[in-house]
Image (spheres, rainbow, N blue to C red):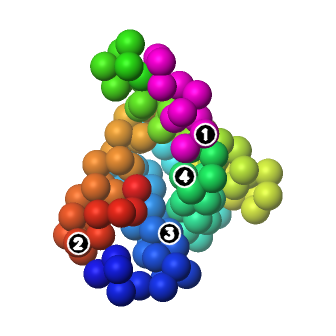
Amino acid sequence: LHDALPISMDFILRWLITAIAVGAAVWIVPGIDVVGTEAWIAVGLVGLILSLINISIKPIAQTLSLPLTCLTLGIFYLVVNTAMLYLAAWVAEGVFDVYLHIASFGSAFVAAIVVSIVSALVNSLIGNENTR
């Protein structure tokens, strides 16, 4: 499926998958809530921002944190994902006035795990192995 999609369609697919994953995190994880906005709008915007961050900033953060990731046998990778979720929430609030409330680092950490798992599951269901 991935090879047949143009680049713009690939990004839209990435955005939809990320939005589904963020929606699952908002629904499942205590301490992750949408405040003051329609939930589906907030989830869609945070999904869009997180997709853009995953394409642009996350590879740089992963490269810079590679020594720590190796020392912790990959667990620090989850901290990078958590930081990207915090960054997406911050940008969503600052740019779109959409508030994704993250109660604690623990909530964000679990939400990052949920986003990763749901993204992987949805990608495997649709056969898109190149989307993160």
Task: Give the structural element (helix, strand or loop) at label 1.
Answer: helix
Q: Between marks 1 and 3, how big is the CA–CA gap?
A: 20 Å
User: Would you place residue 9 above or below residue 92 in this image?
Assistant: below
Residue situated in front as seen by the camera: 43 or 56: 56
Amino acid residing under circle 3:
Trp
* Side of 35 relative to 90 (left or right): left
According to the picture, the residue beneath numbered tag 3 turns out to be: 15
User: Would you place residue 26 above or below residue 65 in this image?
Assistant: below
Quadrant position of the N terminus in the picture: bottom left
Residue situated in front as seen by the camera: 66 or 127: 66
The residue under the point 52% across, 48% down is 33
The residue under the point 36% across, 63% down is 130
Q: Earlier in the sequence, mark 4 or mark 3?
A: 3
* Membership of 26 in magenta stretch: no
Give the dominant element type of the magenta stretch: helix, strand or loop: helix
Position in image of residue 109 (x %, y %) = 43, 31
The residue sitting at the left extreme is: 125
Q: Between marks 3 and 2, how big is the CA–CA gap?
A: 16 Å
According to the picture, the residue beneath numbered tag 1 turns out to be: 60
According to the picture, the residue beneath numbered tag 4 turns out to be: 54
According to the picture, the residue beneath numbered tag 2 turns out to be: 127
**Tag nearer the camera, 1 or 4:** 1
Could you tell me if residue 103 is visible in this image?
A: no
Q: Between marks 2 and 4, how big is the CA–CA gap?
A: 20 Å
* Side of 131 relative to 84 (left or right): left
Amino acid residing under circle 1:
Ile
Amino acid residing under circle 4:
Asn
Q: Earlier in the sequence, mark 3 or mark 2?
A: 3
Q: Dot 3: few (<14), some (14–19), or many (≥20) neighbours within 10 Å? A: many
**Tag nearer the camera, 4 or 3:** 4
Position in image of residue 69 (x %, y %) = 42, 22
Q: Between marks 2 and 1, how big is the CA–CA gap?
A: 26 Å
